[in-house]
C-alpha cells in the first residue's frame, strides 16, 4: 500500500509540474485600459471568445459580440454586462457561414458604429458540411468569412488607428497545407468524411489563418493597423460539440486533466490585443503570450499571396 501511495504521489507531482510548466501557458500582463475604444469579437458568446470579451469589457471597451445564435449571444451580453459592470456590450448578428451575412454585418456596423479599434477573429468550427455559398464549412467559417469581414472593415480600422486585428488559429496549422486544385474545383480544403479527414481539413483551415495574417501584415505596412495570429493552447471549449459523443466521453479524462479552461485559453488573445510595444511583430504567430517561430510553409510568401487572391475571388471581393 505504501508503494502504491508513493507511485500515486509521484504521478500527481509530475502532473502538476507538467501542467504549470507546459500546459498552463503564459499570462497577459498588460494593464492597458480601453475606455473610448470599440472591439468586435466574433463567436463572443462562449468559450475563449466570451472570456476575451469579458476581460476587454472590464477594461472599459465597447464590445460588439458578433455571433450567429441570438439567444445565446443575448445571454452572454447579460453575463458580461453584469460581471464587468460595463453596459457598453451589444450583440450584432453575424453568420460566418454566409457571405451575405458577413456583408450585412459590416454594412450595419459601419453605419451605426463610429469606431473600430480591435477586431478579434475568434469564432471557429470543427465539422464537415457546406456553407450556404457552397463552400466547405471549415474553410468558409474559419477562414473565408473572417477574411471578408476583415477586408470590409479595414478602412475603419485605419481611420481609428493604432488598431489591431487578432486571428485565433491553432497549433494544428503545423499539420495543414493548402490544396489550391481542391479549392478551385470543390471550394473545399480537402475531401473525405472520416474523423482523420475532418481533422486534416481543420488543420488546413488553421494554416489559412496564419497565412492570411502573414499576407495581411505585408499589405498593412505603412498604416497604423497591425495584425497577429495565435495558438490559444489546448482549451476545453465547445469547438468539438459536433464530434462523436462516444469519442467525447472517452476523451473526458484527458480533457479534464490536460485542457485549459477558457480563462487560461484567452490569455494569448488578450496579449496580442493589448500588449504594448508588439507593433514591430505584426504578422507574427504567438503562443503562451510569446512570439513563436513559424515553419517555412506557414510563412511562404507565394502561397500566402495566392491564398489571398483565391479568397478575394471566392468571397466576391474581386
Image (cartoon, grey):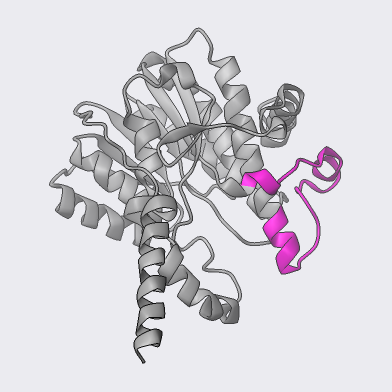
Residue 185, by quadrant, is top right
Point 31% across, 38% down: residue: 28
Residue 271, by quadrant, is top left
Point 16% across, 53% down: residue: 83
Q: Position of residue 37 (x, y in %)?
A: 26, 27
**Residue lying furthest bottom in this view?**
1
Q: Position of residue 11 (x, y in %)?
A: 41, 72
Above or below — where is 37 with respect to 266?
above
Point 75% across, 61% down: residue: 197
Asked whether, in this view, residue 106 is left or right of residue 242, the answer is left
Residue 184 lies in the magenta stretch:
yes
**Residue lying furthest top in this view?**
222
Q: Position of residue 297 (x, y in %)?
A: 72, 33
Magenta stretch, residue numbers: 173-200
**Residue lying furthest left in this view?**
85
Residue 307, by quadrant, is top right
Above or below — where is 308 with respect to 5?
above
Asked whether, in this view, residue 97 is left or right of residue 83, the answer is right
Along the viewing direction, whichever of 112 and 71 lies nearer the viewer = 71
Amino acid at each position: 500500500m505504501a508503494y502504491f501511495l508513493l507511485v500515486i504521489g509521484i504521478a500527481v507531482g509530475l502532473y502538476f509540474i507538467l501542467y504549470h510548466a507546459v500546459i498552463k501557458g503564459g499570462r497577459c500582463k498588460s494593464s492597458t485600459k480601453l475606455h473610448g475604444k470599440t472591439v468586435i469579437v466574433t463567436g463572443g458568446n462562449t468559450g475563449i471568445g466570451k472570456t476575451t470579451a469579458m476581460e476587454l469589457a472590464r477594461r472599459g471597451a465597447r464590445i460588439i459580440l458578433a455571433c450567429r445564435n441570438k439567444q445565446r449571444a443575448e445571454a452572454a451580453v447579460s453575463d458580461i454586462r453584469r460581471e464587468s459592470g460595463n453596459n457598453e456590450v451589444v450583440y450584432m448578428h453575424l453568420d460566418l457561414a454566409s457571405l451575405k451575412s458577413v456583408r450585412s454585418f459590416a454594412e450595419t456596423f459601419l453605419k451605426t458604429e463610429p469606431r473600430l479599434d480591435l477586431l478579434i477573429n475568434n469564432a471557429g468550427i470543427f465539422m464537415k458540411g457546406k456553407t450556404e455559398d457552397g463552400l466547405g464549412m471549415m474553410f468558409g467559417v474559419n477562414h473565408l468569412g473572417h477574411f471578408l469581414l476583415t477586408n470590409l472593415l479595414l478602412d475603419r480600422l485605419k481611420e481609428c488607428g493604432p488598431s489591431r486585428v487578432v486571428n485565433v488559429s491553432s497549433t494544428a496549422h503545423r499539420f495543414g497545407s493548402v490544396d489550391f486544385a481542391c479549392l478551385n474545383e470543390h471550394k473545399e480544403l480537402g475531401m473525405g468524411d472520416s474523423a482523420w479527414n475532418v481533422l486534416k481539413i481543420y488543420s488546413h483551415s488553421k494554416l489559412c489563418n496564419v497565412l492570411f495574417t502573414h499576407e495581411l501584415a505585408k499589405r498593412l505596412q505603412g498604416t497604423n493597423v497591425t495584425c497577429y495570429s495565435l495558438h490559444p493552447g489546448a482549451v476545453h471549449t465547445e469547438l468539438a460539440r459536433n464530434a462523436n459523443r462516444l469519442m467525447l466521453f472517452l476523451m473526458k479524462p484527458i480533457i479534464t486533466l490536460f485542457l485549459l479552461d477558457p480563462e487560461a485559453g484567452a490569455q494569448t488573445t488578450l496579449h496580442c490585443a493589448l500588449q504594448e510595444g508588439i507593433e514591430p511583430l505584426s504578422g507574427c504567430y504567438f503562443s503562451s503570450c510569446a512570439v513563436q517561430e513559424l515553419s517555412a510553409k506557414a510563412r511562404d510568401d507565394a502561397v500566402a499571396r495566392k491564398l489571398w487572391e483565391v479568397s478575394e475571388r471566392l468571397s466576391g471581393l474581386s
